Amino acid sequence: MSVKLNCEQKHAYDMILAACFSGEGQAFFIDGPGGTGKTFLYRSLLATLRSQGYIAIAVATSGIAASILPGGRTAHSRFKIPLDFSKNKTCQLSKQSSVAKLLFECKLILWDEAPMAKRETIEAFDDLLRDIMDSDLSFGGKVVVFGGDFHQTLPVIERATKQVLIESSFPNSILWSKLHKLRLTQNMRAMLDPAFSQFLLRIGEGKELLDENGEITLPPDIVIPYYDKEQSLNRLLQSVFPDLHLYSKDPYTMINRCILAPKNSSVDELNELLINRFPGNLQVYISSDRTVEQRHQGDYEDFLNSQNPKGVPPHKLLLKENCPIMLLRNLNPNEGLCNGTRLICRELSLNIISAEIVFGSHAGKRVFIPKIPLQTSDNERNGIPFIRTQFPVRLCFALTINKSQGQTLDYVGLYLREPVFSHGQLYVALSRARTAVELKVLLVPGTFDERKTDCKTRNIVFNEIFDLTQQ
C-alpha cells in the first residue's frame, strides 16, 4: 500500500513509522484539505503496523469518520471520554482494564477529524495516557497522530458564541505547540475538476468574493432555481435519487448518494419525503416514552411523544425494506455496530430489525437491532429528561452537514432551507462531492412565497482559527 503514496504522504508515512520504532514518543498533526489523501495515509500506516503484528488503534471524533477507518471507533467510546465535562473531567477508564493494556502496548494511536473535538476532550485523553504510562511526557510518550482540516467544522456546542467555539478548539490547547505539523497539499480530487477544487479552497479559506450583503455567489450550474417549494425540492430529490425503484432493488447503488442540510429539522423533512416515495410496504414503529421521574408520566406523555431530541430516534419511526439507516448508539463496536454506522434494512419485524452493514471492515455483515431504552441528555431544551424505548436508528437519505464530515460521496444534494450557521459548514457540504457535476444546491428564500433565482448564500469562516494553527 505504501508504494502508492505520493511524495508528501510518503514523507509523513516514513516520519511517523520512524517515531513508532524509535521508542521515543512523538505527537503529529496531519493537516490537509479534503481530497489530499489523509484517509489513504492513515490506512497505509495501520496496515503496515498491523501486518507486522503490532497494535495500532484508530479512532475519530465522529461516528461516520470512525466507520471509514479499519477497526475504527469513536474516540469517546474507545477512551471512555466524558460527554459532559461540567460533571467529570477525566476518562472513565481503569488502569487495570483491557483497553488500558491495549493503550500501554500499542505502537500508534491515530485520531481522525481532531478539529471537531473540544480542546478539553484531547486534554483528558492526554491525562489518560500519562496515567497509564506513568509518564510526565505529552500523551504519555506514545506516538499519536491527529488528523483533520481546520477549514471544516469545529466542535458542536449548542448556542455557543464564536469566541466560545474558538476557545474550545484544539489549537487553543497547550498541547497544540507540542505537535509536529505535517501538511498535505497535493489534491487528488483536483485532477478531476481543477476549477471546482480552486473554488472549494477559496470557500474554505473565506477568500471567495463577498457582495454588499456579505454573501458569496455559487456557480450557477450547481444551483437549482427556486420557483416554488414543491417543484424545486422535487428537482433536488430527482437529481440525487433519480430512480428510487432501482435503488430499492439494489440499495448499494444509492448508499453513497446523500442530501445534506445544516439543521436536523430539514434532514427530518427530507427523510420523511423520501421514505414515503421509496417503494415497498411502510412499517411504522411507535416508541414508548416515559419520564425519568415516574410521578410526571401522566402529565407529560403526549408532550414527550411530540419531542424529537438530537441523538434520539423519532417517536414515530418510518422504515421500509432496503432503505438506508444510521445507528445512533454504540451497540456492539467489536461487531461494527457503532454510533454512525450506516446500514441497509433487510427485514423488518415487530421487535427486531435485520440489517446489513455497508461500510468498513464489517461491510456485508447481517446484524440484528433490538429496541432499547435511550435517555435524553440533561441539557435538552424541553427541560424534562425522559426515556424513549425505540430502535436506535434514523433514516439517512439525508444527513446534517456536520454528520457527513469525513466522507466522499458519489452525488451530493445541499438543501439550504436556512443558510449555514457555523464555521466550515458550507465548505464541508460542497467538498463531499468530487466534482461540480456531482453536486446540486437548492437555496430557499427567506419566505416560501418568494422566488430565488440568484446563487447567493452565506459562508462562515473564522479566520482566527487559521491564525491559531500557525502558532
Image (cartoon, grey):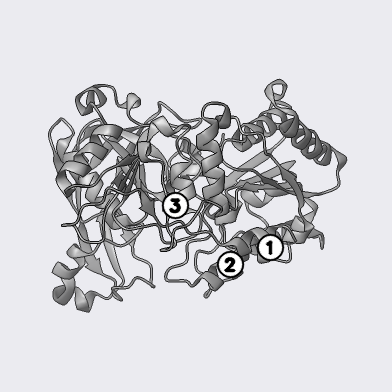
Decide: is 329 above or below 70: below
- Numbered label attached to residue 468: 1
Q: Earlier in the sequence, mark 1 or mark 2?
A: 2
Q: Earlier in the sequence, mark 3 or mark 1?
A: 3
Q: Residues within 10 Å of mark 1 (few under 14, many from 20)?
A: some
Q: Secondary structure at mark 3?
A: helix
Q: Quadrant of the C terminus?
A: bottom right
Count of residue discs: 3
Q: Nearer the viewer, residue 48 or 15?
A: 15
- Numbered label attached to residue 93: none
Q: What amino acid is found at the position of numbered circle 3 in the picture?
A: Asn
- State left or right for residue 35 relative to residue 16: left
Q: What amino acid is found at the position of numbered circle 2 in the picture?
A: Ile
* Mark 1 in CB contact with mark 2 (< 8 angstroms): yes
Q: Nearer the viewer, residue 328 or 235?
A: 235
Residue 273 percent coordinates (x, y): 18, 44
How many angstroms separate mark 1 from mark 2 (CA)? Answer: 9 Å
Decide: is 396 above or below 380: above
How many angstroms separate mark 2 from mark 3 (CA)? Answer: 17 Å
Question: Can residue 94 be seen in the rendering of this structure?
Answer: no
Q: Nearer the viewer, residue 105 or 171?
A: 171
**Which residue position holds label 3?**
402
**Which residue position holds label 2?**
166
Q: What amino acid is found at the position of numbered circle 1 in the picture?
A: Leu
